[in-house]
Image (cartoon, rainbow, N blue to C red):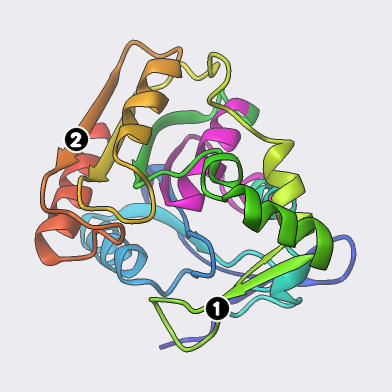
């Protein structure tokens, strides 16, 4: 595999990305927490896009994947801004956002920020507001007292680290307590066996969205990752239909 390209942030930190020109709108894939652009969904979607001659951008937030920086320095806001920077400086024209888990939260934030360019959004187990509903009072107390929580991860050898800075950033970007001013078509793919994001979160997102063109697709036996062949086929079909 070839090395990714890099874009230098104003602070000198390099953001890794892979952009391929093609027919638009450009598909932009936003990874989840502690994930990167080489995840199975991103790679499979990119392979389909390449075969179809579709433009696509994959990216690594700072501190993730091949990008410079420390993971623990990242926040929801800084990673949103990393994605915005690459979209604004690398991608011409219209875009179609796809976001997995935390990436779904970032996709919703981006759709508000770049409403004129976003022609559609696909959330895969989208997790807006998980700093609010995903932590117990005891865990929030640990964050305040110790500045971080370290837990085993189900998806790799590295521990699952949440910093107080990330949590505070999430709390500053909550969406579900008010209408979400997004007018583009939205598709929400959600597994009902998801042990991380309650499946009713997808219904809450749909209820809050301003768009009239919203569909929630519940996969009864689907888990949080939605990375089985049938799940990826559904993702590709959903992106193709929106395109």
Q: Is residue 201 above or below residue 53?
A: above
State which quarter of the image contains the C terminus.
top left
In the image, taking residue 3 as reference, residue 61 lies left or right, namely right
Q: Is residue 36 above or below residue 33?
A: below
State the residue in front, 79 or 134.
134
Query: Which numbered disc covers residue 4?
Result: 1
In the image, taking residue 187 as reference, residue 114 lies left or right, namely right
State which quarter of the image contains the N terminus.
bottom left
Specify whether residue 89 is painted magenta: yes
In this view, the residue farthest toward the front is: 138
Q: Which residues are magenta?
A: 86-112
In this view, the residue farthest toward the right is: 11
Residue at horizontal 37 percent and vertical 41 percent from the top: 123
Query: Which numbered disc covers residue 217?
Result: 2
Disc 1 and disc 2 in contact, CB within 8 angstroms: no
Q: How crowded is the residue under tag 1: few (<14 C-alpha within 10 Å), some, or many (20+)?
A: some
In the image, taking residue 186 as reference, residue 59 lies left or right, namely right
State the image coordinates of residue 38 (x, y, percent, origin top left).
Answer: 42, 75
State the residue in front, 141 or 102.
141
């Amino acid at each position: 595999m070839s090395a990714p390209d890099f874009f230098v942030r104003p602070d000198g930190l390099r953001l890794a990305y892979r952009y391929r020109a093609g027919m638009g709108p450009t598909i932009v894939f936003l990874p989840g927490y502690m994930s990167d652009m080489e995840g199975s969904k991103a790679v499979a979607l990119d392979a389909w896009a390449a075969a179809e001659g579709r433009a696509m951008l994959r990216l690594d937030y700072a501190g993730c994947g091949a990008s410079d920086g420390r993971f623990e320095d990242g926040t929801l806001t800084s990673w949103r801004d990393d994605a915005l920077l690459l979209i604004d400086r690398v991608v011409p024209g219209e875009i179609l956002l796809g976001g997995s888990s935390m990436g779904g939260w970032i996709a919703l934030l981006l759709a508000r920020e770049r409403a004129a360019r976003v022609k559609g959004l696909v959330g895969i187990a989208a997790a807006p507001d998980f700093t609010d509903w995903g932590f117990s009072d005891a865990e929030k107390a640990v964050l305040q007292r110790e500045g971080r929580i370290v837990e085993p991860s189900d998806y790799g050898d590295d521990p699952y680290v949440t910093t107080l800075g990330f949590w505070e950033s999430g709390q500053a970007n909550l969406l579900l307590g008010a209408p979400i001013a997004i007018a583009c078509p939205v598709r929400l793919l959600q597994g009902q066996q998801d042990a991380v994001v309650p499946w009713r979160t997808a219904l809450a997102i749909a209820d809050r969205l301003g768009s009239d063109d919203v569909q929630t697709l519940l996969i009864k036996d689907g888990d949080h990752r939605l990375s089985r062949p049938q799940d990826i086929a559904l993702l590709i079909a959903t992106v193709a239909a929106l395109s």
